[in-house]
Amino acid sequence: MSRPNASELLSAIRIAPSILSADFARLGAQVSEVIAAGARVIHVDVMDGHFVPPITMGPIVVSALADEVHAAGALLDVHLMIERPERQVAEFAKAGADSITVHAEATPHLNYALGAIKEAGANAAAAVNPGTPASVLGEVGDLLDMALCMSVNPGWGGQPFLSSSLDKLARLRALLPASAAIEVDGGVDVRTAGACARHGANVLVAGSAIFGQADPAAAYAAIAQAAGAV
């Protein structure tokens, strides 16, 4: 099955529902609901119990969703909150990840890790935590298809948005090539989505604000409208 063009999809304003907050007993059905509502980026949070305390999911979940997501013309955006992510990127790409994000804080070899993602055939992205300067990503800007600004401390869903992230989003947008997407993750909902988009973010990850609601499709649509997303 052919995959969607990740760079093309990530060039517009998109809301990326995070399955971390989904009902895993109904995971496929809930992903289908938000795709039917217009979602074209499905965000997968991978945690290893070391870089962040929780343990979540791995390539098996990505593989289980890949055919359904790709058939709908959507992509899988895999966010690796794991130590030494360069050791795992090939398996996630093989499983169906279209975009893979590694943390600048999680590897001493960020340049190598991003190169490994590209060699595996996926779009390469790097994330910075709230306490990490945006300028770190300037050193690898030529390798980035996307930069992720964490607007909460990574590891748990449902945290409040850190307002200082807005200025950081603007700094990332000014720092990186125009071709690089800017993603924001943490505390994104109908109240914060518009400000994130105005400050330079065009891929907005929302977890509990979508899947934690009684009607995930309607919640997705409301956040998309607030952000001016396609």
Image (cartoon, rainbow, N blue to C red):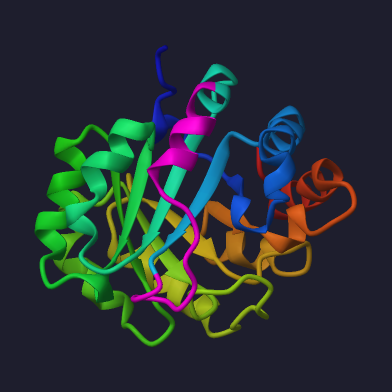
Q: Residue furthest right?
A: 214
- In the visual, does 61 lie left or right of 158? left
Q: Is residue 200 visible?
A: no
What's the residue at 37%, 67% (across, down)? 172
> Residue 182 location in percent, x, y?
43, 56
> Residue 88 location in percent, x, y?
24, 51
Above or below, 91 relative to 211:
above
Instruction: Tell me which corner region of the image, top left, top right, bottom left or bottom right, holds residue 51.
Output: bottom left
Instruction: Specify the quadrant that holds the C terminus.
Output: top right
What's the residue at 61%, 50% (across, down)? 19
Q: Residue furthest top?
A: 1
Callout count:
0
Residues 149 and 31: in front is: 31
> Residue 156 location in percent, x, y?
58, 74
Q: Is residue 60 magenta?
A: yes
What's the residue at 55%, 27% (across, down)? 69
Q: Is residue 117 visible?
A: yes
Above or below, 47 relative to 4:
below
Instruction: Specify the quadrant that holds the N terminus.
Output: top left
Residues 97 and 139: in front is: 97
What's the residue at 69%, 51% (across, down)? 22
- In the visual, does 92 lie left or right of 222? left
- In the visual, does 139 lie left or right of 204? left
> Residue 215 location in percent, x, y?
88, 47
Above or below, 184 relative to 15:
below
Residues 165 and 26: in front is: 26
Magenta range:
49-67
- In the visual, does 63 lie left or right of 13? left
